[in-house]
Image (cartoon, rainbow, N blue to C red):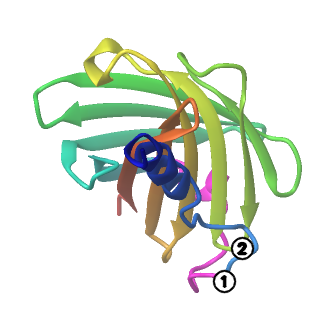
Amino acid sequence: MLRPLVLPLLLLLAACAGRPSLDGPSMGGPEIALEKFFDGPVVAHGQFQDRFGEVRRRFAVDVDGSWDGETLTLVEDFRYNDGQTERRVWSLRKTGPDTWTGTAPGVIGAARGETRGDTFNWRYSIDLPDESGGFRADFDDWMWRLDDRRLLNRAYVSRFGVDLGEVIIFFERAE
């Protein structure tokens, strides 16, 4: 009689797992300023892990960013370990001293983000291309500026409130 209750209980417990907070302690890095960090070439390496910790896909990204004083444009060229490629172009607008909105093909409505100290949190829903599963996913995306050249990104990926996995990315500004 308890077996039918075990899976829903485990899913509920997994959904309650700790997540970062903008009110959490600083990682000690310099203040994050997206318009400065991403203005120019940036390279990144990352991977997607499913909710069981299994690495499902690795990738490298060349990011060409430009800030015109109002809009931060990020042209992201992904190269996946299975040979697939993908280009995503983000247009981010600074809406306040610490707030951002952004759009990109596949993103539903506008992404919304907030900076605090060395941390940036970005939330959005996106229709993933067929090569990435071909479904809509929700991203709770966290970035921490580590130093003048490096940024760490951890994105929690879910669908219908159920965690699917995480994307970990390490960004580095080109010298």
Query: Residue 145: x and y, percent?
Result: 54, 70
Q: Secondary structure at mark 1?
A: loop
Left or right? Give the position of 122 relative to 82.
right
- Residue 79, by quadrant, is top left
Q: Residue at x 62, y 57 (%)?
A: 36
Q: Residue at x 72, y 73 (%)?
A: 117
The one nearer the camera, 8 or 22, is 8
Task: Write the start and end of the magenta stretch as one range.
Answer: 25-40
Q: Quadrant of residue 17?
A: bottom right
- Tag of residue 25: 1
Mark 2, other Cα within 10 Å: few <14 / some 14–19 / many ≥20? some
Q: Earlier in the sequence, mark 2 or mark 1?
A: 1
Is 100 situated above or below 136? below
Q: From this viewpoint, is residue 43 visible?
A: yes
> Magenta-highlighted stretch: main secondary structure?
loop
Locate residue 20, reporting x and y percent: 61, 67
Residue 133: x %, y % from top left = 32, 21
